[in-house]
Image (cartoon, coloured by chain):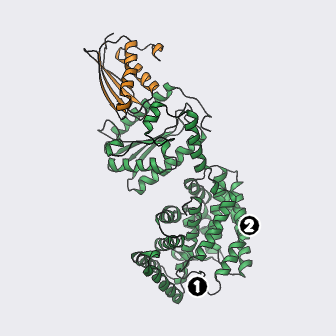
Chain colours: A orange, B green
Amino acid sequence: MEIKQTAMAGTLESSDIQIILRAGTNGYEFELESDVAKQFGDQIKATITNVLQAYAIENAQISVVDKGALDLVIKARALTAVQRALAIVDTPNWEVM
Amino acid sequence: MFTEGQVVSLTDILTSKDVRSARQTQLQASYPEQIICAVKLNIPGNVKTNAAIVNIFVDGWYNILAALNQAGYPVQHTVEYRELATGPEAFIIVDGPIVAVKKVMMELETQLPMGRLFDIDVMAAGNATQLSRQALGFPARQCLVCDQDAKICAKTQAHTYAEILAVIEQHYHQYFNDFRWNQSNAVNFAQKGLLYEVSLNPKPGLVDPASTGAHHDMDVFTFIDSSLALTPYFNAAYQTGFNFHEDDLTQLFAQLRQHGIVAENSMFTATNGVNTHKGAIFSLGILLGATGYCYRQQLTTLTHLQATIKAMLATLITTDFQSLANKPTLTAGEEQFLKYQVTGIRGEAAAGYPTVFELALPQLQKTTGTLPQRLLDTLMYIAGNTRDSNLIKRAGQLEVLAEMHEWANLYFNLGGSKTTDGIAFLQQLDEQFKERNLSLGGSADLLILTIYTGLLTATI
């Protein structure tokens, strides 16, 4: 699947995460900002990667600002960002939830 | 306690963040010159609001507004959403430099008893993100349970839900249901207030164990007798507040006044007709009644104590000073109101004792040294910052207040109670008060109330 439009989900509040998806050409290109990037950067990227793969997105530029979000929050925000980027409004792909 | 209430879903919570974020953007556009503070709570689990949670929020909210005003950053506007299923939240629009406002908020998050449950974001127009602690060089917030970086504990789910709730409940219990506020402690604190005050020396013009000051009809023993005679009254006042169930708190004050009349008679019987504690009977009765009321409501905070007092005395000034012109005999306070328009202890009480809660108690918290040193410095601070109606009455003119202000300044410039110069000055002042027949009865009453509230809050 190709990203149709730049999309954003989430806020910059503590315990939340803001994810911006843009069309890409070179796999998943992450830009991650987090106070806990050192310990949890890979885990955050892996969670978002799982959601992108579930929607068969092959290329994306992913900007992430994490404010200490829990894994389930990261999933939910990633899912919303993907749906907006693909311009889908139907029910979420529950398999990734 | 925190698991009772409406359950919300993750979607509800995330949507509430989106809505809040949108509101913030709107406010930033509407107030481009001001700072926006978003105040909300961090409550774990899927119940985000109930009576206990709203208590935490409301109490913190008043403290936040007071701290901003005290720091000199005037609050321009507030928007409150107390009823949301996703938890109470509010916005404050305030004037001031963003870094300074953020620092005030960070201090509150650390210092308020329930501060760790608060999450206060500070932002200004043009800044996409709120100002972070780390951006100011401050450490990350600590975990509620173990003092590690809170974000790491959250990510690793280091603590169970039950463990976190237990800590919150314990804090809540300590703060809103403080055992210090129970009847036997509160009555004890009222007695201590009276006895500490009379034991303190040297005091200008007032009775203490070493001197009867400018008083000829009483000594420290008269005060001991009078203090002990008031024990039944203190218990009755506390119980009256504890058992008060009506909505109109002015009725609580009306009931307390009846007990106060009985207490004045007990005092005069114990002292052979000398007025030792009339002012203290009035004020301690109000405070004990309010303390019993707050303890019963499980709201043992100074914020609620003060709010209760204000509600109790909402009509005091109008009813008491209304028909004075026709009253055959007047008290000192009533006479001064007619003569100088000074509302005295009634004005102080009706305003929720601002001299006690906003001046004297914070000052007592700052004092150091032994208990008598701390109390002497607090007494002189009160005397220098109040319109003591007993002093005015004895001087027969208002100009004495300016003199008192000077004396207090001089005392603190000499170093206060911890220096021999300071103590020598108090002794000189006592002599001068005796010669001029002056005393500080009003300030002494306020010190008694400050001791009482200091004991309630474990300040002393």
| Residue B447 against residue B305 in the figure, above or below | below
Whether residue B18 is visible here, answered yes or no, is yes
Residue B220, x across and y down, in percent: 64, 80
Mark 2 neighbour density, 10 Å: few (under 14) some (14–19) many (20 or more): few
> Quadrant of the rendered structure where residue A65 is?
top left
Q: Is residue A19 positioned above or below B242 on the image?
A: above
Q: Mark 2 or mark 1: name the one nearer the start of the chain.
A: 1
Q: Amino acid at mark 1?
A: Ser
Judged by depth in the image, the label closer to the viewer, 2 or 1, is 1
Give a yes or no on whether discs 2 and 1 share a subunit: yes
Q: Amino acid at mark 2?
A: Pro
Q: Chain of mark 1?
A: B
- The residue sitting at the bottom extreme is B435
The N terminus of chain B: image quadrant: top right
- Residue at 62% across, 87% down: B216
Q: Secondary structure at mark 1?
A: loop
Residue B337 in sight from this viewpoint: no
Q: Is residue B180 above or below residue B131?
A: below
Q: Nearer the viewer, residue B8 or B397?
A: B8
- Chain of residue at mark 2: B
Q: Which residue does the image show at 37% across and 18% down from the upper left?
A: A49
Rendered location of residue B8, percent (x, y): 55, 28
| Residue toward you, B48 or B420 | B420
Residue B84 in percent (x, y) is at 53, 34
Q: Label 2's element? A: helix
Residue B281, above or below B141: below
Quadrant holding the C terminus of chain B = bottom right
Read off the residue under disc 1: B211
Asked which quadrant contains residue B29, the reply is top left
Residue bearing the label numbered 2: B232
> Which corner quadrant of the image does residue B286 belong to?
bottom right
Q: As drawn, is B376 to the left or to the right of B149? A: right
